[in-house]
Amino acid sequence: MPAGVLVIVPDPVPLFVAVSAKVCRLNVAVTDFAAVIDTVHAPVPVQAPLQPANVEPAAAIGVNVTDVPLV
């Protein structure tokens, strides 16, 4: 046997044996509920008054100009 080689005869026996089993479980939750459900909406809140029309409609016109240089 060369130096540094470790030989174990016979093979070692495991110290622990793992046993697994599946257990089927049923999860049940009991929920109480009402036979009739009533939904009530609150009164509609007062809205802001209508805004007056624009007195200077020309001021709202936009202009877009694109300048392309000649190559």
Image: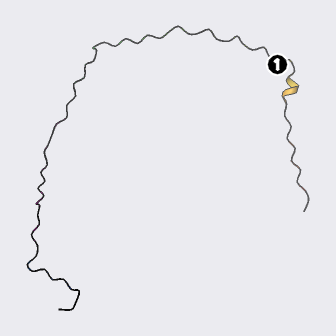
**Residue drawn 16% across the image and 36% down it:** 26
**Which of the two residues, 53 or 18, is positioned nearer the viewer here?**
18
Point out the residue furthest to the right here: 70
Given the image, on which type of amino acid does mark 1 rest?
A: Asn
User: Considering depth in this image, is 19 or 47 the residue closer to the camera?
Assistant: 19
| Residue 25 falls left or right of residue 41 | left
Residue 43 within the magenta-colored segment of the rendering: no
The residue closer to the viewer here, 54 or 12, is 12
- Residue 67, x across and y down, in percent: 89, 50
Q: Quadrant of residue 15?
A: bottom left
Q: From the viewer's perspective, is 65 left or right of 22? A: right
Find the magenta span and give its range: 11-29
Instruction: Name the element at disc 1.
Output: loop
Task: Answer whether residue 23 is magenta in the image.
Answer: yes
- x and y percentages locating residue 35 in the rendered image: 27, 14
Front residue of this view, candidates 57 and 1: 1
Give percent across and percent down for residue 39. 41, 12
In this rendering, the answer to whether 27 lies above or below 49 is below
In this rendering, the count of numbered labels is: 1
Residue at 13% in and 80% down: 8
Mark 1, Cα crowd under 10 Å, few <14 / some 14-19 / many 20+, is few
Task: Identify the residue under disc 1.
Answer: 54
Q: Which percent across, then down, holds residue 54?
A: 82, 19
